[in-house]
Amino acid sequence: MSRKHPFHSLTVGYDWEMAVLKKTTESAGEDEIVKIADEIRKKLPWARTGIDIDLLELRMTIGSNWDEFKEKNRTLIACARKIATKKGYTILPIGARPTEQMPIGSHIHIGTIPDFTDAIRITNAMIPYVPCLVALACNSPFSRFDIGKFKSYRVAYNAEWCSFPVEMRIPQCARGGWGEDVQVRLPRKPTIEIRCLDSASDITLMEEYTALCAGLLYGVVKRAKKMKAERNMIEWHSMNRLSAAKDGLQATLYWYGENKPVTAIFSEIFSIAYEGMEIFGASVDDLKIIKQMISKRQTQSDFLKLFIELDNDPASLFRTLMTVLSDDNAFKTYLKKAKKLPVRKPLSLEEYILSNITKDVPHFHLYMLSPLPSYHLSRLLRKLEAEGKIISTFSPYEAILYTKTDLL
Amino acid sequence: MVRLLAEIMHIRKIKGSGSIEDFPYETFSVKVRIKGSSKKTIKTPKGIKGKTMSIKRPFLKDWMVKRGDLIVLNADETKQCITELGIQGKAKKWKGFTKKDIDSDGYKEILFNNPFITAVLSPYYGARLYQLFNKGSHKNELYGGCYYKQKGYVELGGIEETLGKHGKPDRLWNTSYTLKSTKGKNTLTFITKIKEEKGLSIEKKFSFFKTFPGLVNTVRFHFKPAKTKKKNKKEKKQKKKIALTQRIFFAIGGIPNYMNLYHIPEKSGLHTIRFNKPLYKRGWDDSAWWEWQHCHFTPEPGLIILENELSHEILIIFFSTSKLNYLWTGDKNKTPRMHITYRETKIEPRKEKEYITVVATGNCYCFSNQQLLFVSKGSITGYSTPLSFVFYSQSDKERKILIDTGSTIKTIKMKRLRKIKDIQGRIFYYTMVAKNDINEINATVADTELKVRLHLE
């Protein structure tokens, strides 16, 4: 690894996805979203805003200063809202919609990192911290008519191939990829992209995410140097990722040999991030909303769940949320009054996998469900088979199929 | 399925309060004005747009609604609205059918009843066979879920048509059809013009039977181009290309879970596929184009058996193998489904193309040597249960069935279902009434290996 810091300078940018909705809650449609994006770009040439399938993607220009970044962020959001409102539409950043498909994310780019092997080492070092970011950013307690089982359905569903677990790579042998929770964008772009965050509904929270991610990636460099590949790290990271998607900031993670509430890990994260945040012009003390969320174990998903309790009809719920979230301060108001939530018991990955095995379930389904790499998943399944809980059969089309023995 | 967009006119607090996670809520009587359907592709029931009604709803005190805010009525509120304000009226009998709004969407469906099935047709949504109740199990075997997909498409369920590429839905799924006068008892014909294809119209005919546990569904395309002034006497022949897919949504036994099995007959025997819904499935493009490995090009004979593994009830669909391109089994989707995709063809002016399927329900079956025997149980009436034994073979030879009720054994000649064009082979059936003191019935078709055994309640 080079002696100089791998980040040539510390810069940030983002692709912040959001739905553009008619009054009926239907999407405005691709053609209209393109028109909105084009108008934004004419008004703010530095914001290379565009479209991602059925979503408006606000793209922040490269910035290296917190105050400048915040100013531009607010200008961009205000501009987008004004244009959309004029056309009779509402812009809604949220992790997923209760009815439609299309997971919606906040993708934060941290640069400027010119060396590919350095970037890979940093990404490897970020693996244990991804579940913490997932837990923090939960904002999709529903997706496509499924409600209530996860605080981030978006991450549980791997954002439908748009945010899946980080591959641990040998830097000298690695090639580029696309779509992982933390993704090296070299050799195309000199950034590392954090993709695992559900789209933030609160503007201030999005700013705090960006500052935190900038600091964390900058500071984790020192960890990367000392990092030894822990044999079981991928296994427990996978479990943690699922726990975080399920329980948000109430999750208990497995952390270097012990169970630990995810909120307790953030002190370590802040200590890693502080130096980079200062270079960016921010401080840990600026993360007011994040700190409040951590102290109360509350996420944006917990806020949305209040409304689910009153009305779990997806279409009706969605319209209610459109109205509620049109107030920029809605989540802040909630957070002020919300109580502290209890820590939840650690998720048993074995029990979770077993609960999703019925009859003739292909290995591939469990692979996508579990975020475990194949090696660890196969080990777990062999253990369940040895315990007599499942049986396996072979299929030339789908490799191994699993059936729960009490369903036979 | 329909949800209504409404504007709040007035709010009045009423009795009923509580809290969720220490956030207090109160209940209000809310007067709303109906603005229309919350989905452009789902029709607004007649007579309700612009009208007002009151609903009861709880709201969180910290996020109160106000006059002018928009809401979408939930399922119960929508039903209340249509009942109070809609103009469809009560169910009524009509020519051996019943017209009734069974799903409270403000539009009447048309129901047909015989001892074994209740079939529900929806003229306003593609003239589809919307539901098919198996009276032996009291379950609707056709299920959609009403899930929203891209570009306004909603998975309503039942059997719908599309001319879209790779079986993707086009506009036919929610096209309104008009009823056409038809000769023949227990037959309904619907017709519509396809807006995007000038001169092309579709006619859908449903033929039902008094004692057969199924129906014949005919989809007929007519091409009648507009006349053009041509100096040249040899008018250039225009032809229309069509590639029809029938999209079938089902849940045998009423539950769209892993108990749903597809049985596809091939030369080597029955090929069985289990429905398994993955959690991860990407939301877009669940079609034959992506899932090409689920395409089956050589079913023989032309039928598919969809079974519930636990109850053994079945839905059988017979189709033309001479026109078939492939069957696609959507066994890795949110709910079980399949496509019958026909080969692309061309229709000449003033000609027609026809696609026929036979859809039937049963409660147990036996398949061997490309022959099928199944029995359909009807609703218990008084002191007896109607039973219909159905046999399919590629041969037209007369068939006899041996029925053993425990106390008697009878050999009976089976009735031939009328010959159905393009469906290879022949369907035979025999209908009887079993008295309620019979616990079990065994039936065998003479000169075959086929046997069924049915336990009666």
Image: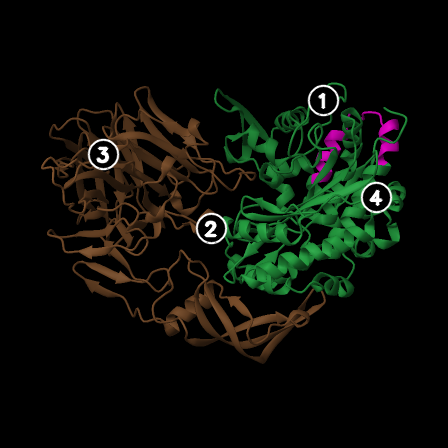
Chain colours: A green, B brown
Crowding near the residue tagged with mark 3, few <14, some 14–19, many ≥20 C-alpha atoms within 10 Å? some
Q: Secondary structure at mark 3?
A: strand
Q: Is residue B156 magenta?
A: no
Q: Main secondary structure of the magenta part?
A: helix
How many numbered discs, if any? 4
Q: Secondary structure at mark 1?
A: loop
Crowding near the residue tagged with mark 2, few <14, some 14–19, many ≥20 C-alpha atoms within 10 Å? some
Magenta part of the chain: A220-241
Residue receiving disc 3: B346
Q: Quadrant of residue B311?
A: top left
Crowding near the residue tagged with mark 4, few <14, some 14–19, many ≥20 C-alpha atoms within 10 Å? some
Regarding residue A342, the answer to whether it shows in the image is no
Labels 1 and 3 within one chain: no
CA separation, marks 3 and 4?
67 Å
Could you tell me which chain the residue with mark 1 belongs to?
A
Q: Which mark is residue A265?
A: 4
CB under 8 Å between discs 1 and 3: no
CB under 8 Å between discs 4 and 2: no
Task: State which mark lies toward you, 2 or 3.
Answer: 3
Q: Identify which amino acid the numbered label 4 is placed on.
A: Ile
Residue for point 85% across, 54% down:
A286
CA separation, marks 4 and 2?
39 Å
Residue receiving disc 1: A174
Q: Identify which amino acid the numbered label 1 is placed on.
A: Ala
Q: In the image shown, does B114 or A333 lie closer to the viewer? A: A333
Labels 4 and 2 within one chain: no
CA separation, marks 4 and 1?
29 Å
Q: Is residue B73 above or below residue A99?
A: below
Task: State which mark lies toward you, 1 or 3.
Answer: 3
